[in-house]
Image (cartoon, coloured by chain):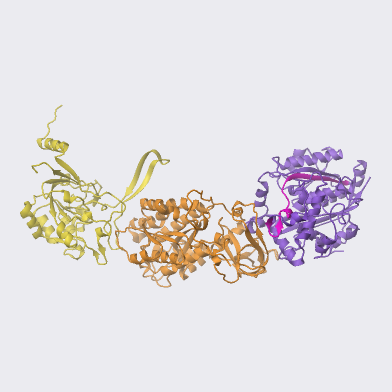
Amino acid sequence: MTDPLKRPPKKDPQKRTLVPTLPPFARSRKAIAFTAAAAEGRLALQVCAGCGHVTYPPREICPKCWSMELDWRDVADGGQLLTETLLRTSVNTYFRERMPWRIGTIKLDAGPTVLAHLHGDVPEHGRVRMIARTDKSGQGVLMALPDEETPNMADDRQLRTLTCDPKYRRALVTDGRTELGQCMAQALADAGATRIFVGIAEEWRPYPGSDELAAVPGVEIMPLDVTDTISVNELAAEMGDKADILINTAEYVRPGSTMERHGVTLARDEMEVNYFGLMRLIQAFGPGMRARGADGDNSACAWVNLMSVYALSNWPVYGTTSASQAAALSLSQCLRGEFAGSGVKVVNVLFGPLEESWRQPLPPPKVTPARLADTVVHALKEGIETVTLGPVAEDVVRRYKEDPFVLERELTQLQQGLRP
Amino acid sequence: MAKGTRNRSGYDGVVVAAPVSVPYERYSPEPAHWWLARAISALGAKSGLTPADVDGLCVSSFTLFPDTGPALTQHFGLTPRWLDHVPTGGASGVIALRRAARAVQAGDASIVACMAGDTNHVDSFRAMLTTFSRFSQDAAYPYGSGGPNGSFSLMTSNYMNAYGIEREDFGKLCVAQRDNALCFPHALMKTKLTLEQYMDARLIADPIVLYDCVMPCAGAEGYLVMREELASSRKLPYARILSTIERHNGFPDDPVQFRGGWALDKDEFWGLSGITPDEVDLLQTYDDYPVISVMQMEDLGFCDKGAARDFIRANTFTYDGTFPHNTSGGQLSVGQAGAAGGFLGMVEAIRQLVGEAGDNAVPDARYAVVSGFGIINFDRGLCSGAAALEGVRT
Amino acid sequence: MTKKTSNALHALAGALAAGTIETVDLTHTLDPDFPVIVLPPEFGQCARFRVEEVSRYDERGPAWYWRNFTCSEHTGTHFDAPVHWISGKDLPDSSVDSIPPAAFVRPVCVIDCSKEAAADEDFLLTPEFIMAWEKKHGRIPAKSWVLMRTDWSKRTGAEYLNMREDGAHTPGPTGDAVRFLVEERDITGFGTETVGTDAGQATHLSPPYPAHYLLHGSNRYGLQCLANLDRLPATGAILVCPPLKIKNGSGSPLRVLALVDRSAAA
């Protein structure tokens, strides 16, 4: 059984903060497909379209039938631990700092034999459940977990390098004026976050739920308006060194397409929140988080962006908002690049229509703010970086993966009752 | 006789000569070119050959980048009519021999210089591991970056579990090799090792301890392949090539490696050699970890599969023991000079057979088997090979 | 070359130099967090005051510090031109760039409603209240600015807009009061300490937003978000309030000053 994580002590001001080092990041192009699936929390391997053989490590050709059609498919996650070792030396600085390190050889039920990180609770020669996740270098890796839940399982030292568990961490929720922001704070509190900084813009305007929000354990209300550079910088100066997790709940959504907009004022407001707001947050909080990627049990670990799935492909019914969220998605990709090497994950949650006033006339199925908040916490606990939430979002992402150009046509064709 | 080998010809009239070892160094600021240059210089000095005489070249090296064989011909002043560059690591000593022997036999070359050499800068081992192979990069190195220590510890653990062999048994091989090394002037390990020290040694990757691991270093090895009459006319002591095998990716479906390609080819190997395992005077295995030496003993038929434990307990492995093994100390005690590690056993075997071994000489050595094992890709070694040699004293 | 200086300006200059005429600043600092008027969310909104650095003695400009700011024509302490409201849209000289500049320097009367506003946040200024004030302070001179003092500028945070679920609750004038000031007293403009010239609940008055509707419909001007009105005498001060000369501008943030005679005679 895993020793429960202890609440990290206060930082020794005389000690230098550990500089983030990285596990090996070089991968072949084929292996990047494994990483992309791992970022979604999926265990996907190449399956031969010709003979069905499941192959690993990633190849260009099926070693059984020489078909070159190797499709990445989700495979069964069961496996058998064949042999293991406890590494006590490593040529890699990252692992050297974290020795000893348990690894093992696992025969997957899906076929291949793989090398994987090994959870401390997996018994010798035991059954395992495999997960694929991104590691601190941002690349996909395999880890074998105990077949069944064990006490304090999430606190395993090696598993925690793949996850962003809010337990004993400090989080910033950038907008607490909305139900979403308030649900987010509650979900973080439930997950054991010790301090939850919640940004509130324009405190001179009252907002519903303010009293309940202030009563959530660990919540500290902070002035923050993502459209105001000064406000963002002032907050970063005050608590930026404690932003282990940043969840950007600020969003600006308005229905309408370009011609209905009658000028760019609203569109500019959308950009001010959705795009420039994100940029301001990155400029203010990014450098500090990037420097704290290896700062102990409450290191900086995740930056979470919440975006409408129409960031992927414009839906003219919310045309200019979609455009601003596309800009935000693009910027989050840039952030992923800027955080590469820091060990801080960029988590993008693409959600379908949210149950809130600006999407009120949209038909179900919708995503409730509480569900979105729970999904974020789940993603953090699991270490998943790319999340799709709700049937609408899942549908759009599926079509996007199949062919983004077809999706574009589908979303922009005339639709009954939804003509922009 | 194994499938597909009915018409295979032997190596009649082809011999190996002029074994040279360039003394190893733990770290070297010199490039691989310098180490290979020393090897070819030593080959020339030993054989009396000049650049104009050598018309075949076979090279193995990991650290020669950006150069390969062709660049070395210009660098070394050679104009060969036959050239090869074998990237088979620990199997390269055997594989170079196979390539060169057939070239000489067919008349494509008269004298082939076979060389392996690598440098070891302070950080070059780490750098080499990082980019060793695509499968390793994608599927092994990210898991703790233990390098070969990690892969072999998994194999060792599995092997011990399957066959009941114990650490003392591995230790016995390591201690014997150290004893051999104390009689070999070029060995980097100069102090005696006891079984007690072995058993108490620092763990590297369970169950592998410090003395199970080779020490990366810089060095070079070389030998010449030519026709027997040419060796005689130049008064070079030589050894005949009786038999060779090679195999790659031998048992791809074994979940964990517990055997190598030798097991596929051993019948052919002994059949072609005309000798039996009992007649072998010394065995040189590729010994980057003792477990792999054990596999070679079994898979080449010196004992049955799974019987290595008893075989080890029944024999002694020093140069003067009942089963002389890795008589120079092997890589475990001499050091692992990159690809030269794949030549070390071959060169030592030739030295023993032509009577050039020193204090570690195996008395009356006539037959030697050299085995190679190379390229840990992802989870296992891919290349295996072996050669049987017969010494001819002039 | 000699130049004839008017006696009045000469006296003014002397008094300013001597400090017997004080320059009082009636302006709030332009601060990103200063409240602006909040309309129902489906309408266009007033832009907040925002600042972005262009350079600060750094690689963007090594020896100089400067910034770009953005805001609405109606952010912070600001001036409303007649064209701001639909009732004034077709009037001549009704945008900030075309208003005759004389309107920007005028006598000012300050009607103190601070006690009433403290007692009733929805206090409405009526003609009767104005006439009662006149009894005490004299008739409001033509072309004057009239400022409604409520001490609202001393409020901060949520207290300032005083928003509730049924809207803002802040004092302002009745339609009759505005009509009286325009038609009976011919004022230049009307100013308040609150976020608008109208009361918080003015949408429910008739006409809705009477200050905006009637003032601007008569080509008169508005000032809002004023401060320091408690430092002005009821009468006798001069207001200085030139807005930015924005082409066709509906209003403008501005610096509002008052000249107050502090001599013993005053």
Q: Establish if A79 lies above or below C15.
A: below
Q: Is residue C74 visible to us here?
A: yes
Closer to the camera, C229 or B316? B316
Closer to the camera, C258 or A216? A216
Closer to the camera, A57 or B365? B365
Closer to the camera, A413 or B21? B21
Q: Horizontally, is A49 left or right of A385 in the view? A: right
Splitting the image into 4 quarters, where does residue A258 fall? bottom left
For the N terminus of chain B, the quadrant is bottom right
For the C terminus of chain B, the quadrant is top right
The residue drawn where x is 39% and y is 53% is A235
Residue A223 in the image: x percent, y percent?
Answer: 35, 56
For the image, the number of numbered tags is: 0
Q: Is residue A60 visible to us here?
A: no
Q: Establish if A202 lies above or below B39.
A: below
In the figure, what tint was chain B given? Answer: purple
Examine the structure image and report whether residue B219 is included in the region drawn in magenta. Answer: yes
Q: Horizontally, is A97 left or right of B198 in the view? A: left
Provide the letter of the chain coloured yellow: C
Q: Name the residue at the front extreme.
A: B196
The residue drawn where x is 70% and y is 63% is A63
Q: Which residues are magenta?
A: B203-226
Q: Name the residue at the right extreme.
A: B394
Residue A113 in the image: x percent, y percent?
Answer: 67, 65
Splitting the image into 4 quarters, where does residue A366 fall? bottom left
Provide the letter of the chain coloured orange: A
Examine the structure image and report whether residue A274 is included in the region drawn in magenta. Answer: no
Residue A145 in the image: x percent, y percent?
Answer: 60, 67
The residue drawn where x is 17% and y is 58% is C211
Residue B80 in the image: x percent, y percent?
Answer: 80, 42
Q: Horizontally, is B76 left or right of B240 in the view? A: left
